[in-house]
Amino acid sequence: MAFNDLIYPGTRNKIKIYALRDGSYLGYVKAGGNPQTGMAVEDSLGYFAVGPYNSRLKCINLLHRKQLWDRPVKDAAAGSIIVQDLLIVGSGKTVTAFNRFSGKTIWNVTVDGRISAPASFAEGRLYQPSDDGTLYALDIKDGSELYRVKLDGPMVSAVAVGELVYATDMKGDVVGIDPGSGSIRWHTKLDGPIWTSPSVEHGSVYVGHSGGVLAAIDGSDGSVKWKYDAVDVIRASAIAVDDCVIFGTMSGKLYSLKRTDGSVIQTRQLKGAIAQAPVSDGNNVYVATDKGYILCFGESHEPGSQPDQRSDPLSQSQ
């Protein structure tokens, strides 16, 4: 049975649950530590790691709010992913595939650099960045290395996969990589360190950097289609929803831009920095800030329209 509510790993050893329909508080699950990875969810099962003192990887049944298993995992990187029946977790210099139902280790691989970003998956290949600037392409079946690609700077964000594999680094590089051979097809340089994962939609790659600029790049050849200067640090990835590109800044400003030319559709000033990417279910957009707010913006992506806004200050329910 699928789980259809909003899950928020709080900072007080709790996994909090909210109703998507109206943001009402539905309760919590004890985390047994400070959640440090975010939550990966498939059906009714949720996966997260706690640390740093009680370093465990945990699986909970979100419907019954019961823990099913836990395993020792130290320094887990944010953003575990689920591939078929596998839970892929990066920790330290190791990538591990767990059976998501039992927690049994299926395979693990050691890489040269530390893992500070989640893996991505497409067509049987797992793409794992590391902070020494190496992107590893691994076979999902056994973790064997297919190839590796070296970028100039540290990689601290996941890659995106479309026609090519799109990777970024802290020196402002954006590269398009052939997914079969690992050869670099094109290389584009932006003017600031990139902390964010690229987003791919309709053949365009959207990348924000800490200099405050969001760029739309042609996914086939790396040419820059347009840039928008938000004049503030962009730490969270953008998302494309219908004809909009939505992103936030560390000053708490939320932008909706027209996908075709980067012109502004709407802006909102939120309370707190937006350090995590917005998410969307296709109808609504959900945004969290570091002041403990989650906001839901309803279906409105046309110029001049006003989104329905509901907010739930988490501090009131802690």
Image (cartoon, grey):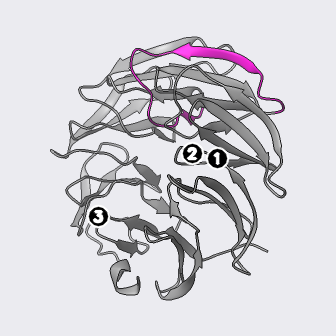
Question: Which label belongs to residue 76?
Answer: 2
- Residue neighbourhood size for the residue with mark 1, other residues' Cα within 10 Å, grouped as few (<14), some (14–19), many (≥20): many
Question: Which label belongs to residue 73?
Answer: 1
In 3D space, how far apart are the residues under numbered discs 3 and 1 (Cα atoms)? 47 Å
Mark with earlier residue (3, 2): 2
Asked whether, in this view, residue 252 is left or right of residue 312, the answer is left
Question: Residue at the front extreme?
Answer: 53
Q: Are marks 3 and 1 in contact (CB under 8 Å)?
A: no
Q: Give, as a three-letter code, the residue at label 2.
A: Ala
Q: Quadrant of the C terminus?
A: bottom left
Of 92 and 240, the residue lying toward us: 92
Circle 1: element type: loop
Mark with earlier residue (3, 1): 1
Of 91 and 169, the residue lying toward us: 91
Q: Is residue 138 magenta?
A: no
Circle 2: element type: loop
Residue at point 44%, 66% (across, down): 285
Q: Position of residue 304 (x, y in %)?
A: 25, 69
Residue at point 64%, 32% (across, down): 94
Q: Are marks 3 and 2 in contact (CB under 8 Å)?
A: no
Circle 3: element type: loop
Q: Is residue 142 magenta?
A: yes
| Range of magenta residues | 141-162
Q: Position of residue 132 (x, y in %)?
A: 46, 20
Q: Give, as a three-letter code, the residue at label 1.
A: Val
Residue at point 29%, 36% (across, down): 209
Any part of residue 234 in sight: yes
Among the 4 quarters of the image, the one containing residue 125: top right
Asked whether, in this view, residue 104 is left or right of residue 14, the answer is right
